[in-house]
Image (cartoon, grey):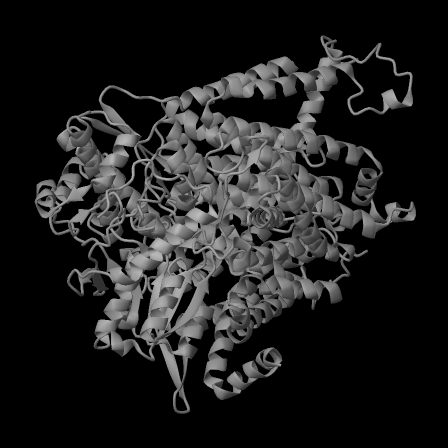
Amino acid sequence: MFYREAGQYKTTYAADQQIFPIRQDRIGIGVILVLALLLPLVASEFMLSAIAIPFLILALATIGLNILTGYAGQLSLGTGAFMGVGAYSCYKLVTIFPEVNVIVHILLSGVFAAAAGVVFGLPSLRIKGLYLAVTTLAAQFFLEWCFIRISWLYNYNASGAIEVPGREFFGTLVTGPAAGGISRYYVVLAIVVVMTLLIKNLIRGRIGRQWMMIRDMDIAAELMGVRPLVAKLSAFAVSSYVCGVAGAMFVFFYLGAAEPAVFSITLSFQVLFMAIIGGLGSLVGSFFGAAFIWILPILMRVGLPALGVDIAAETVFQVAQMVIGALIIFFLIVEPHGLARLWAIGKEKLRVWPFPYA
Amino acid sequence: MRMKTLLAGSVLMGLAASFVAPAIAEDSVYIQLPTYRTGPYAGSGIHIANGMSDYLAMINARDGGVNGVKIDFDECETGYDTQKGVECYEQAKAKNTLVFNPWSTGITLQVIPKSSVDKIPVLSMAYGLSAAADGNTFPWVFNPPDTYWDGLSAIIKYIGEQEGGMEGLKGKKIGYIFLDAGYGREPIPLLDNLAQKYGFEVLQYPVAGKEMQNQSSQWLSIRRDRPDYVVMWGWGAMNPTAIKEAVKNRFDMSKFIGVWWAGGDEDARAGGAGAKGYKSVSFNNVGADYPALQDIKKLVVDAGNSHTPADTIGENLYNRGVVNALYMVEAIRTAQEMTGKKVINAEDMRLGLENLKIDEARLEAIGLKGMIAPIEITCSNHSGHHPLFIQEWDGEKWTSATDWFSPLTEEVTPILMQASKDYATSNAPWPTRDDACPAN
Amino acid sequence: MDMLYNILIDPFVQMVDAPDFLIQVVWEGFVAGVLYALIALGFVLIYKASGVFNFAQGIMVVFAGLSLVGLHQKGVPAWLALILAIGIMAILAVCIEKFVMRPLVGQPDIILLMATIGMTYFLIGLGEVIFGGEPKQMITSELGLPTGSTAFEMGERGLVILQHIDIAAAVIALLMVGGLAVFFNRTRIGRALRAVADDHTAALSVGISLNQIWAIVWFAAGIVALATGIMWGARSDVSFALEIVALKALPVLILGGFTSIPGAIIGGLIIGIGEKVGEIYWGGLVGGGIESWLAYVIALVFLLFRPQGLFGEKIIERI
């Protein structure tokens, strides 16, 4: 009843094929965007810096992984390393070309990550599934080793870490320690929204459909004229590009400085869990998953003591880990398509409300 | 429904925000203690966390806080993970912490640039960025009583003494086994400098963080290269593994010297009887006989207000946690005296840290006389290059192997100043100090 | 030219110069390899019976070792702690079968793999909540395992040191493989296991209970994990840092094949010895530390030429 597309006639192909063909969806997206734009008015610095910004960035990384694992069906455990490539190349670009706008650097840094992704994606032409997971693990460990061992990457700093210098964007400081949470938030929001829209279009288009064909049945796809070489490597490239941009943003807009340990396998798993819980092969799910995995431990950490539950700091940490582990199993059993599927079910119910079915 | 979800979401988020809203009660100050009682570094982190919490709890219980101002503290679990560390920092900032003790070199590096913007002093006791000792460039960062470079120079000085003077180092081979991260790499420039000056050779043995428990290759290489001494920069699970491997490979333990963070009781105990003779440089004595520690035992641990096992009080890392808390408490006291306020804020705390002076008389009054050397922090020198000593594992516990002695300050200072200048230029525009230090 | 000399000739000169050292390096690699092989063995058992790639084997090793040491620290005598630890692994096996495997039966491989990753996280949290996060020392001597070492003189300066615990590890691994071989080939349950591994549906139709078999397999993997935990714990400490080292079992399996027990053993030894020799003799050329990825790269190269592994039973899905 609330969510019914009856009466919304499409008279042109263009109208029928737009991203959000249903009016309610358009309104909903608009409302969410407006709320996101208004968030800094009500949110504290902590909410912006420790919740909203990392959530958006990790959601973008999850989208990156989802392109590869959810849409193209190639399991990757190397997301953290690809994010690292983005972060380190962005750092190098910023220090080599300090006069160029930092946003340009962030978008460019993904290109290097894409190159790394293609190189480590090459074995996917011969193998798949679990075997491919091992090659992405090789990428993870090898790249991590490079971040530590190649001092050129961090400009021979004694500390071995990359530090983000302050950079301006249209007169406002957006990176570095002095940049306020609000300006960083708006830049992150803008990049994430634009990239999500671009990826949505990519997936609706020819390339995205090829990826899904490869995922669903590679031999059939090949028979129908999809070239696996192009499809798989493009999936690796686009996925790594998005992850690389997310990695650069993670350091430049959130962490402020990074040691190689930031891009360890733990980060890869974190992003993978976001993709699973959110729902593989769903963009909106990426946002749900990131929100869930990122915000749940913070809520537990901050919320339980406030509710009067006397619990040691480390126990919260451990229990959060148990809960996440259990939830992953729960989702895989009950709803393998993740939160995105629950969302779709909810929409379906709304459509026929107040009747149980139409 | 969509609106409902959104509403529910925003209510939830609002709740989250209200939880962290500043909660300043009358006459109390808040300090957040980032700790790690889980993860691969927990073996070291637990004792530190216990020492810090217990000392602060004891001050509250015995003295009713500092000059009547209670210290309201809680722990934030970082798991030694930089992501969680930043989250803890944001939370600490929102709750107006007086001071932030990152307890991880990685997290320290992350918060150093933020500290001057957020005006929260960072107390990284004998870890973090060595260059931060330069108070003119890093007004908000404190690393007393010594930097890593001081520690390394003290170890080299000690080795020199064993070889009959610094000339004796000529032609010697010194192995350096380190955690392959910012922490372990930091001393390398100074090590190379000293090697050039005194004519010894340095052999590096990096240990990757995730391979901490699998060091047989490094120790095989050490066996092959036969260095005269091995210096270790380890933390967490790396230490016990290294000591075990050294014993296994029959390396002469008296020639194996660790930094202060490689000096946990459990680290050395892992080596069994063979670990006897292992040394580590230190800035605090062990033992539980100090009156202040007895007060902790009586008022906090025996009263059941702590998870500390009673027999770990007085162990090296526990006492070090106590020292860290001691610095904070004394800095609060100093700040109170200087500002005349009872409830101080983070900016006053910086003032207190910058003028921190704990002399013998003060230590006696606190009940920790003899545990640490007297310390003094000044505006331009945030570390102080204080005396250190070498301790030796006798198979059961740590004992002093030397008296207190000074590190090679004259070697350290020039490269320290250079490093701090480099840091400021590579992070330009680096904020300058608004109140210049008096020239000294 | 120098470069080529350093890569192609110098390492071999070193090997010939100090044969005792080479023996020591190979021995250390062998022992590490035995431990990799034991972890890989746990993977293979489960993969054969249920087609599940058990990512949680590493954490099962930690969990088993932790239960043993943790119970002993709480005052339980060593022998009882060992029995209780075996009991805990049995309970764990039944729970995994009942709450994870049974509901997920028939799902794609990737889903099952992810479920075991979820299990890993759950077990890490659980282990830390129960036993605390700090590393613990293995109760080697209390369990009656040898702790000393024997040194063999070789030539003038040569010295090869063998740790008794390492020899014990090798012997126990051998016994375990032998025991498993007997179990698989000679017992009723073992035959049922092989039937399940061959064809689930056919096994079901002749009256084999899949659920029971799976619980038994997970229990067997749990026992292997306990043995691995004891051995590895004796070499370093029992701590959660072990869990990442356990990932090394993946390249071992690629080399050995996912379904072959001898493959797991030989693959483990190749990886163990290969990475030690590589690190000691060639690692210095690029700054050391190549051990962290060398195994994966060996596996990668292997995948390109022989994707089914050395002893793999069937050709894996290839394109």
Which quarter of the image is occupied by the N terminus of chain B?
A: top right
Relative to B4, residue B375 above or below: below
Question: Which residue is found at the position 30% from the left and 75% from the top?
Answer: B252
Question: Which residue is found at the position 44% from the left and 71% from the top?
Answer: C166
The answer to whether residue C317 is left or right of residue C42 is right
**Marker count (numbered):** 0
The answer to whether residue B215 is left or right of residue C47 is left
Question: Which residue is found at the position 51% from the left and 77% from the top?
Answer: C26
The answer to whether residue A323 is left or right of residue C261 is left
Q: Position of residue B275 (x, y in %)?
A: 28, 67
Relative to B157, residue B18 above or below: above
Q: Nearer the viewer, residue A259 or A59?
A: A259
User: Is residue A115 shown to the viewer in this render?
Assistant: yes
Relative to A284, residue A235 above or below: below
Q: Position of residue A158 (x, y in %)?
A: 43, 56
User: Is residue B243 shown to the viewer in this render?
Assistant: no
Question: Which residue is found at the position 30% from the left and 59% from the top?
Answer: B412
- Quarter where residue B399 is shown: bottom left
Residue lying furthest front: B439
Residue lying furthest bottom: C155
The answer to whether residue C34 is left or right of residue C50 is left
Q: Position of residue B404 (x, y in %)?
A: 16, 60
Q: Position of residue B277 (x, y in %)?
A: 24, 69
